[in-house]
Image (cartoon, rainbow, N blue to C red):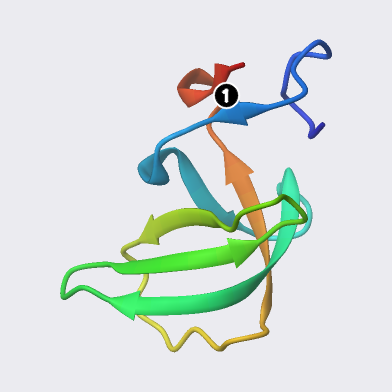
Amino acid sequence: PWAGAPAHVTEAMFRPHDVSIADDSTAHLKGTIVAAFFLGDRTRLAVNAGGDKPLILETGTRRDYKHGETIGLRIDSHGLLSL
């Protein structure tokens, strides 16, 4: 679990626009970038955060994202769909 998630949630889904890159002080999770795809006005990132599949997120921040780079992730709790 991560900060902000209800205690009973063991697995959750969210849309790519409900997760953002965060600094360590506000991040709910940390992950490692496994792929980055520049899409013009945004970049789609695949991030290994310890689950079976990578998390997918999109960011409008323009910078060079490196494979293997560790980043902090913050998930909007209003966008969580618990399973």
- Residue 68 figure quarter: bottom right
Which residue does the image show at 41% across and 84% down from the upper left? 63
Q: Is residue 47 above or below residue 22?
A: below
Q: What x and y, as percent, mark residue 60?
A: 31, 64
Name the one closer to the observer, 13 or 30. 13
- Left or right, 28 with reference to 1: left
Quadrant of the image occupied by residue 48:
bottom right
List x then y, in percent, for residue 21.
55, 58
Residue at the limit of the structure toward the front, as seen here: 52
Question: Left or right: where does residue 46 sit relative to residue 63?
Answer: right
Q: Which residue is mark 1?
A: 77
Where is residue 78? Give x, y as percent: 49, 19
Give the amino acid at mark 1. Answer: Ser
Rendered residue at 37%/61% (across/down): 59
Q: Is residue 78 above or below residue 47?
A: above
Query: Which percent across, then down, holds residue 23?
Result: 68, 60
Neighbor class of circle 1 (other Cα within 10 Å; few <14, some 14-19, many 20+) is some
Q: Residue at x 77, y 55 (%)?
A: 50
Q: Is residue 41 above or below residue 15?
A: below
* Quarter of the image with the C terminus in it: top right
The residue positioned farthest toward the left in the image shown: 40
* Helix, strand or loop for disc 1: helix
| Quadrant in which the N terminus appears | top right
